[in-house]
Image (tube, coloured by chain):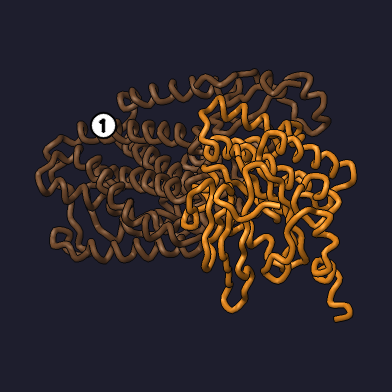
Chain colours: A brown, B orange
Amino acid sequence: MSAASTMIERGTAPSRIAAVAVAIVIALLAVAPQFLSAGAVDRMTALFIYVILAAMWNALAGFGGLVSVGQQVFFGLGAYFAIRLADAGLNPFLSLFVSAIIVGVVSWPLSLVMLRLRNGEFAIGMWVIAALTHLLVNLDRLVQGETGTSLISLNVYDAATRRVTIYWLALASMSALLAILFGLLRGSTGAAIRAIRDNEDAAASVGVRVTGTKRLLFVLAAFGIGVAGALWLATSITFQPKTYFNVQWTAYMIFMVLVGGIGTFEGAILGALVFFLIETWFGGTGVWYLVGLGATAVLFSLFLPRGLWGTVEERFGLRLLPVGYRVRLAEDAADQSGGDAQPLKTTTNRETA
Amino acid sequence: MSSLSDGATLSATGVHKRFGALVVLDDIDFAMGADEAVGIVGPNGAGKTTLLSVLSGAFPPSSGSIAFKGDDVTALPATQRCRLGLVRTHQVPKPFSGMTTFENVFVAASHGAGLGRDEAYEEALGSLKLCGMLGVANRRAETLGLLDRKRLELARALAARPTLLLLDEIGGGLTDGEASELVGTIKELCRRKIGIVWIEHIVHILLQVAERLICMDAGKIIADGEPQAVMADPQVIRAYLGGGPK
């Protein structure tokens, strides 16, 4: 039995197909505006933003164990800084991304304080930060309290150009952010992130830089949600602080992640899709829509606590975008391992990615 | 019997640890060489695990200093001490429950030992093999039983490539067969010139490995030296069996 002949596999046969499928889907989405109505383009833009939000919250909470109910602070700041930058004369489209970078930069000093808090303290502490930030933004003369303001400079572009440009920016942002997240979570930093989630002390005892790793994740999530907030501003033009700094944004993130499957990369994307469909079909029903969302969340936590994808993964062993590691034992080693080695039907892939 | 010399690899000097009014470590002086195998025994509450925590950097001592490989590491957190080669296991296993056994060990190889991907794979597989855990490599750690969790503590610590390993009761609850396997593993580590500090209640297992034995009681080291002599020490016997005739 030789450890050297044992393989570590990262991908699976379905995951290689999935990678191709993802590329095709993104390509199709890129040309889709040609065939979609204006309303549908706007809806798809919203979907891309939801995917970003869900993926970021999932990375933070599902992979990093940093459960926050104050992520709307970065959503609101992403929009607010974009307003400010555009007001200062920067191109409105460029403002969206410069704004997100500023959100990332701001989140760094914030992390110095917030990451000292643990669990529930961190979760609620983030909410407090969001509420405080909301009040501070209200003090800005440009925003005029809850009256709000608009991203006026976008109006120089005609409606059709604006709509499609924002759609493409949202699609590109979503794809890029998902790629960055996937790369991060799949690498050795991703293993460290999950280790910290499971046991911080043990992670430190085996050499993981706990605080630095959490900070990286925190800043990345802030940046991503900042992008989402800025894009939302671009689609809706108006900026009212209470709309952006509303805790409902984090509630949506939590909903999407819990329904889709917390801690699985596929789950967040699936959850965003489910949320998007529910909103599309039932969003017009007012209060009953919210009741339905709440009931769905309760049903899932009772009957499918691992969410849709978590359950699929468990039942069928299906992993389309895997970030984990599977050991494929050499024949002689497998013989020794007895009955508990799971059958690995997937093809071997000595990792090269 | 080693003295508190400058040549020591790991040393604690005048270490106290208080939790509020409770004194758990009371003026500990301890030093050991690079490839020594030191056993630590003592009744419950003697401060053994606390000593290990202070040595490994899980928390700082209230006063006193720790030196490793000639440097004062008192202020260094556990992460840094691990990267220097001073690694511990936990008495109550602390697995990364949502990760597989392999992933648990890979984290240590990748971050603790600072290895690149392929080397980290080899290291992780090597330590799983040494600890007899290859068969459960793909199991989520939360599904492992207590014995496997204890093995995992050892495998994970090993993958961080320690030069000195602090073991906290990894032998509790083992059958005779499992215990002799464990002794074999630890002896292999000694052959690889890894220094060992091993806290264990099961003295007969410990004595197969330890060439030096320390007995603690009420936060103090009450005996330190050749194992048989320590076990025969009247103070040690009193610590274990209670007061007896004064």
Q: Is residue A293 visible?
A: yes
- Amino acid type at image mark 1: Val
In the image, A281 versus B65, the foreground residue is B65
Position above or below: B197 against B223: above
Instruction: Using the rendered view, name the quadrant where residue A53 is placed.
Output: top left
What residue sits 72% from the left and 21% below the top? Answer: A2
Residue B235 x, y percent position in the rendering = 80, 69
Query: What residue is pinned by disc 1?
Result: A164
* B209 horizontally vs A62: left or right: right
In the image, A195 versus B58, the foreground residue is B58
What residue sits 32% from the left and 38% below the top? Answer: A42
Residue B42 x, y percent position in the rendering = 76, 63
Q: Is residue A279 visible?
A: no
Residue most extreme to the bottom: B246
Q: Chain of mark 1?
A: A
In the image, A211 versus B6, the foreground residue is B6
